[in-house]
Image (cartoon, helix red, strand yellow):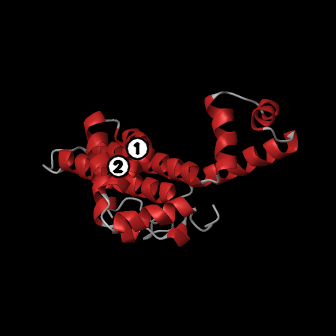
Amino acid sequence: MAKDAAPRWDRKMQQRLARGEAAALGELYDRFASLVHMLAHRVLDDEEAADQVTREVFGYVWENPDAYDPKQGSMRSWVAKLTNSQAVHRLRQTEAAALADGSGSPEEREELELKVRRATVAARADYIVTSMPAPLRAALELAYHQRRDYRETARDLGVSEDEARRRLRLGLQLLSTAHARPLEGSSPPGYGRPW
């Protein structure tokens, strides 16, 4: 995931948010609310909690537009990172609170940690996909959601079969890093911590 300069829309959006333009927040919400909700729901598996995370993410963006660094990538990937971070943090809090009374068995604690690890991997995978360049993301979406093979993907995207294979291979290689465990004592930016 190369850190390309943010598109012009992203930079303008940040400037508008920094000026306090409510219309900018509405436009951002219209563009990314379904993505934010889907990512939060995937981690939390709870409609109300996903709604709450969605409100928290857009509230944070509204209050902290300067936290977005266009040099680090697109507004879309930043919002996805915020969402995943907050959703995993909320999952940890919710599950830990359920076991906080001390009555949790070792099996329940182990199940909690496994649930959090799975949610973290899912969040990382979602973040990786949302951060991919559009051509890679489009190829993966065709292959995964529409069950297209590389020939059909090439035809649908209007590219050569070799290019479709390259995009799919690269996209899958990037996605496979979602399962990589961070070094002890460190975590990827934005994962498992609230902003």
The label on residue 100 is none
Q: Are marks 2 and 1 in contact (CB under 8 Å)?
A: yes
Residue beneath the point at 60% across and 68% down: 5
Residue, disc 2: 26
The image quarter containing residue 42 is top left
Q: Which labelled disc corresponds to residue 30?
A: 1
Instruction: Please give the name of the residue rendered at 34% of the width and 60% of the height, measured from the top-left corner.
Output: 61
Per the image, label 2 sits on a secondary structure element best described as helix
The amino acid beneath tag 2 is Gly
Closer to the camera in the image, 134 or 169 = 134
Image x and y of residue 138, in percent: 66, 42
**Quadrant of residue 162 within the rendered picture:** top right
Asked whether the viewer can see residue 140, the reply is: yes
Q: CA distance from mark 2 to mark 1?
A: 6 Å
Quick one: 177 or 9, which is closer to the camera?
A: 9
In the image, 57 versus 178, the foreground residue is 57
Q: Nearer the viewer, residue 184 or 133?
A: 133
Q: Position of residue 15 (x, y in %)?
A: 41, 68
Q: Amino acid at mark 1?
A: Asp
